[in-house]
Structure formats: structure tokens, C-alpha cells
């Protein structure tokens, strides 16, 4: 019985797809969009992306109206989100291993586990002139007066 119902729904959705390709705008509900997303996943071995919208039978506007976002649609269809997993990198200062997103790794050549490691790395070995030391000293003295 379930197979007959599934087959009927499958044929109905394929008929909607044929109507859509003949330039008749078709509105899909959540389950139908999820069905086509899973079908795309089975054929292409990755979840549908926004750039794949030309070959999908529904529009981005329909997805946003029904689900609120593309990611919500993928979650509803129980498909993996298209994200790169974080990679393990070594801190340039303390050599500690930590995870970092690929998009963050592209921003710089050196990777730091914290802002403190970043500051320590770039300030180590810095030479100050006597004038700079005097400015720092007077600034610290002024702050100590107001702190008391």
C-alpha cells in the first residue's frame, strides 16, 4: 500500500516537473521541495546549492517563503549542509593544535590560537627608542594617578 502511494506521489511530482518545464509556474509545498532536493542529492552526490537553482524545478523565492532559508530547506530534507569541515592547524606562537575554518585560513599565512598569541608573536623582539619608552612611561604614570 505504501509503495503504491509513494509511486503515485512520485508520478504526480514528475508530472508537475513536466508542467514546470513547459513554462507554467508551479508552486510546490515543503514535502515536494524536499523530495526534489533529495532526488538531486541522489543524482549529483552533493546537496543542492544556490548555484544549482537553474536545474531545480523550484525557485529560491519559493524556498525562502516556505522555509526561511536555504539551510533550513536542507535540514528539512535531511541533507548535509554544504560546509567545509574545520581543519587542524598549529599555532605559530605556542605550537598548540586547534581547529580553524578553511575560509579563515585563507585570510593569513600564520595561524594563532588566540589574540594573546598573536600579540606575543608580533611584539617579541620589538625595539623601542628612548622617546617611545618615555611616552609609555608617562602614559602609565598618568593612568596610575587617576586609578587611585
Image (cartoon, rainbow, N blue to C red):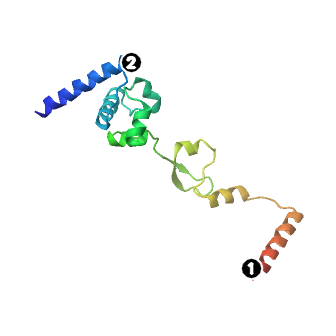
Q: Which of marks 1 and 2 is nearer the N terminus?
A: 2
Identify the residue shown where x is 34% and y is 26%: 26
Image quadrant of residue 143?
Answer: bottom right
Pointer 1 with pointer 2, Cβ within 8 A: no
Identify the residue shown where x is 81% and y is 59%: 127
Residue 107 coordinates in the image, percent (x, y): 62, 43
Residue in front for this viewpoint, 70 or 28: 28
Residue in front for this viewpoint, 32 or 99: 32
For this view, does 98 lie left or right of residue 137?
left
Identify the residue shown where x is 63% and y is 48%: 110
Residue at numbered disc 1? 147
Residue at numbered disc 2? 23
Q: Residue furthest bottom?
A: 148
| Disc 1 packing (10 Å; few <14; some 14–19; many ≥20) | few
Image quadrant of residue 40?
Answer: top left
Image position of 22 with respect to 128: above or below: above
Question: Quadrant where the C terminus lies?
Answer: bottom right
Q: Residue furthest top?
A: 22
Residue in front for this viewpoint, 54 or 48: 54
Q: Total marks drawn?
A: 2
For this view, does 147 lie left or right of residue 112?
right
- CA distance separating discs 1 and 2: 74 Å
Question: Quadrant where the N terminus lies?
Answer: top left
Image quadrant of residue 129?
Answer: bottom right
For this view, does 3 lie left or right of residue 69?
left
SS at badge 1: helix
Image position of 51 with respect to 129: above or below: above
Q: Nearer the viewer, mark 1 or mark 2?
A: 2
Residue 69 coordinates in the image, percent (x, y): 43, 41
Residue 78 coordinates in the image, percent (x, y): 32, 41
Residue 52 coordinates in the image, percent (x, y): 44, 28
Q: Residue furthest right?
A: 131
Amino acid at each position: 500500500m505504501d509503495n503504491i502511494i509513494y509511486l503515485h506521489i512520485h508520478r504526480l511530482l514528475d508530472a508537475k516537473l513536466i508542467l514546470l518545464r513547459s513554462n507554467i509556474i508551479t508552486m510546490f509545498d515543503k514535502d515536494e521541495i524536499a523530495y526534489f532536493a533529495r532526488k538531486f542529492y541522489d543524482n549529483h552526490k552533493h546537496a543542492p546549492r544556490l548555484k544549482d537553482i537553474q536545474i531545480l524545478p523550484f525557485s529560491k523565492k519559493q524556498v525562502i517563503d516556505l522555509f526561511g532559508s536555504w539551510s533550513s530547506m536542507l535540514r528539512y530534507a535531511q541533507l548535509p549542509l554544504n560546509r567545509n569541515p574545520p581543519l587542524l592547524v598549529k599555532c605559530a606562537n605556542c605550537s598548540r593544535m586547534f581547529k580553524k575554518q578553511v575560509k579563515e585560513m585563507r585570510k593569513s599565512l600564520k595561524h594563532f590560537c588566540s589574540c594573546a598569541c598573536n600579540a606575543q608573536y608580533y611584539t617579541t623582539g620589538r625595539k623601542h627608542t628612548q622617546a617611545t619608552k618615555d611616552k609609555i612611561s608617562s602614559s602609565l604614570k598618568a593612568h596610575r594617578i587617576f586609578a587611585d
